[in-house]
Amino acid sequence: MGFFDKLKEGIEQGVSTVGAKSKEMIDSTKVKMDIDTLKKQKKAAFEEIGSMIYTMLNSGTLDEAQIKAKCDAVTGIDNQINAKEEELKQIQQKA
C-alpha cells in the first residue's frame, strides 16, 4: 500500500468518525430538548394542579377525582422523562 493509499484511508476513516460523532451529538441534543420540554410541561401541570386545588378549596368543593386525573397526567410525564433519560444514556454509551 502506497503513501497516498494510506493517506486516503486515514482521511476516510477520520471523516467517518466525525460523521458518527456529529450524528451522536445531534441525537443527544434532540433528546435533551425533548426532556426540557417535558419538564416544562410537568411544571405547568403542577401549577395547574395548585391553582385547581386553591379554587376548589375556596369554593368548598374539593373534587378528588379531578385532582387524581391531573396527578396521573404528571405521572405520565414523569414516565416519558425517564424514558428519554434512558434513551440519552443509550446514545452516550455508544460513544
Image (tube, rainbow, N blue to C red):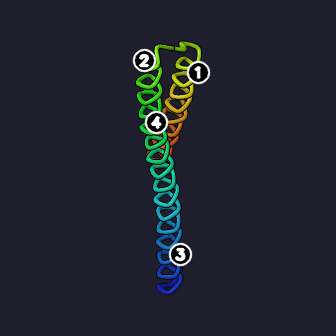
Give how far apart the Cα atoms at labels 3 and 1 are: 55 Å
Mark sitting earlier along the chain (3/1): 3
Provide the residue designation for mark 4. Answer: 42
Instruction: Give left or right: position of 39 versus 8.
Output: left
- Where does the image place residue 10, in percent across and percent down from the top left? 47, 75
Provide the residue designation for mark 3. Answer: 12
Give how far apart the Cα atoms at labels 4 and 2 are: 22 Å
Of marks 2 and 3, the one in the foreground:
2
Q: Residue at x 51, y 84 (%)?
A: 2
Of marks 4 and 2, the one in the foreground:
2
Of marks 3 and 1, the one in the foreground:
1
- Where does the image place residue 49, in percent across and percent down from the top left? 46, 27
- Where does the image place residue 42, in percent across and percent down from the top left? 46, 36
Amino acid of disc 2? Leu
Front residue of 80 and 40: 40
Provide the residue designation for mark 2. Answer: 57
Front residue of 67 and 10: 67
Q: Secondary structure at mark 1?
A: helix
Mark sitting earlier along the chain (2/3): 3
